[in-house]
Amino acid sequence: MSYEQTLWKELENVINPTYLKKQNKLKRWDYGYNEDYDFIVISKTGQIGQIIEIQNLRIALPAEDKPFKRSKVQKEQYWEKQEYPKALSKIKSRFDWDEYPNEFKEEWYDYIDNEFKKRDEGYWFYNNGNPTYITGTHYMYLQWSKIDVGAADYREANRLFFIFWEACKADKRCYGMCYLKNRRSGFSFMSSAELVNQATISSDSRFGILSKTGADAKKMFTDKVVPISVNYPFFFKPIQDGMDRPKTELAYRVPASKLTRRKLDDNVKLKELQGLDTTIDWKNTGDNSYDGEKLKILAHDESGKWERPDNILNNWRVTKTTLRLGSRIVGKCMMGSTSNALDKGGNNFKKLYYNSDVTKRNRNGQTSSGLYSLFIPMEWNYEGFMDTFGSPVFIKGKNRVYGVDGVEVTTGVIEHWENEVDGLKDDQDSLNEYYRQFPRTENHAFRDETKDSLFNLTRIYEQIDYNQEINNNTTKGSFIWENGIKDTKVKFVPNKDGRFKISWVPPKNLQNRVIIKNGVKHPGNDHVGAFGLDSYDISGTVDGKGSNGSLHGLTKFSMEDAPPNHFFLEYICRPQTAEIFFEDVLMAMVFYGMPVLAENNKPRFLYYLKRRGYRGYSMNRPDKIWNKLSPTEKEIGGIPNTSEDIKQAHAAAIESYIEEHVGQLEQGMGDMYHQKTLEDWAQFNINNRTKYDASISSGLAIMACNKNRYTPVAKRQVKSMYLGIKKYDNSGYISKINK
């Protein structure tokens, strides 16, 4: 067994080494987004070193700077919280500090100044022989933040989390992070530590807390934020207004500032310092929480658990405005959560998470939500499976491994997780809950409950998991007319930006098969398979959204060189114009030589086929004979979606296909490789079909390939006829003719 991590990677050859050396010497690397190299500089020294990528976000780390070495022995090099000097631990406030003689202050000036430097620039130390950088925020969390167990453990997962967060803060295009996490990852404490860290150095600022309920937000404030603040060393802690342990608002009136020699020599007193006027508070959960306020940091905890009537999407639309002045972003949101079931707040969080993908930006360089999404798989952050150096024990090797608590780690986290999953195979709802709590993939995190599903979710999720294990089996690409000449032959061109996902390409002898009947083109491979289509008629919509066009291709059992009952094509997209969509679909049909069964309530595509001479590619509804079709149905084909019988037949078709061809089967695992379609099936609601484009078209493809099942059978009429043959009653001694 082996494990290859994909959470982050080092980028090489991004900058010419000579140029990098020159810029570092001149300290010309500015903190923030660098447009020339498309990375975010989180260094505050003007010098950069390693460039890494975390979830597609390119980040330039500071140049290495004299890492602290705990020991000369490699195995004894790890993070260790430094003991607070006893002489300083006795000082509780800046008032107490003022009473000490200058000689005493001079003795500790360098120590205090160095702590401020670490807080601002970050910290380097040797970890298992490797120079390791942590951000200033991470340092404050490890060294100076008191959590429920005392001091936080160093974890490599948290190092990457804080680096990502620093990049979010540095990038002027970004409103913050949307962190999809596993249970007990420490997010609540880390975000609380960041609130206190930033609040104690910010003037005239507001810091806020939201959670799945007001009670949860209050608990985070009283049990996490306040204790961290109270336990700060005096030189980081401003003078607090009001109660020592407030319940609703933590107010700082006098700043924590560097105790410089000038201030010492000039005997600048505390009373002469200008107050911070900075507060941290919490709000009850609601769509309009913090509406009208200006926030510097919002800690948004348990965002994936907002249940109706509360809606995280509505809240974020409001809250987002509290973090900006005009077009300028002046605050950041630190959002993190596991996900509830989709109908219990999870679906809204899922939308927000995927709207935060850094690879999908508008012309202003921002994601749809303004946030940056981050997912750290559970194997990186699972308690009990961290070694002395804070690294996950993915796979247990031959050598003995010990955790930070000195207890031996006897198995790898991957094996442990798989054992848990195997034990829950017979309880799908419990299994899905475990997936959501401890996800290894984004799909795990957004697993839904099975009880309300129309289809067999066990089989669907088995297939989804299998597809992820084999790293899927589809190719993205586009169809084009040969030499750019329409209505000739079509070619498939692999393309990472293509709109089609293909899992089977027919051999040459099956490509572009066409039959001409009475001047009308007909598909030459209708015995091999068919398409199902959910079309749209209008190119643009008022809100710029609209449903997607969806096309699916499915094979039948045939004697040709084709895998039977196999979904070979998935197209779920809404190009800029309907005509582009129509042409895409037409080219796919011509290339595979297969007909299409389309809904005729949106007939524009079907008329498009007829005008182009491809009426023969449009299937008639299979549940009626020709004489029973309407004039429009005879003209363009297609099937209506309004009939209750059709709706039931459509759902039954998908249900049957899943049972026979998806998930773990007697002959092995199914070969349905299209993840979007599987996920659409998992959520399908027969009473609200319009949302599920992939389910509509895939179901029509199944019906098209099994059209004989829906062919009406004429009723037999039995009519008695006299054939001239007499019948006799032979009950007595003499036969008598029956009358």
Image (tube, grey):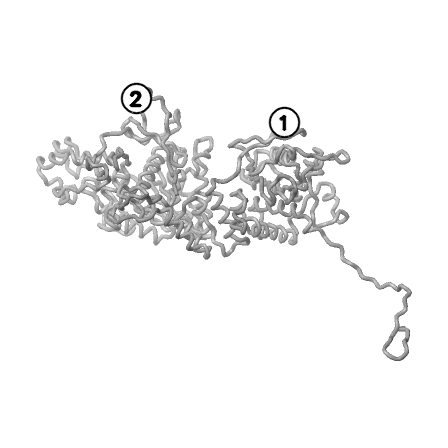
Q: Secondary structure at mark 2?
A: helix
List the residue tagged with mark 2.
21
Q: Residue at x 26, y 50 (%)?
A: 148
At which x and y percent is residue 225?
28, 47
Total marks shown come to: 2
Q: Secondary structure at mark 1?
A: helix
The residue nearer to you, when weighing 347 against 505, is 505
The residue nearer to you, when weighing 297 against 646, is 646
List the residue tagged with mark 1.
482
Position of 718 with respect to 28 (left or right) is right
Report the Cα–Cα distance between label 1 and label 2: 51 Å
At which x and y percent is residue 9?
37, 34
Say which quadrant the N terminus sits in: top left
Position of 302 with respect to 240 (left or right) is right
* Residue 578 visible somewhere in the drawing: no
- Quarter location, residue 198: top left
The residue nearer to you, when weighing 536 against 243, is 536
Return the disc, 1 or 2, that comes first in the chain's sequence. 2
Few, some or many residues within 10 Å of mark 1 (<14, 14–19, 20+):
few
Mark in front: 1 vs 2: 1
At which x and y percent is residue 153?
26, 45
Position of 65 with respect to 420 (left or right) is left
Q: Amino acid at mark 2?
A: Lys
At which x and y percent is residue 411?
33, 48
Q: Amino acid at mark 1?
A: Glu
Which label was assigned to residue 251? none
Question: Which residue of the protein is positioned furthest toward the bottom in this rendering?
Answer: 733
Few, some or many residues within 10 Å of mark 2 (<14, 14–19, 20+):
some
Say which quadrant the C terminus sits in: bottom right
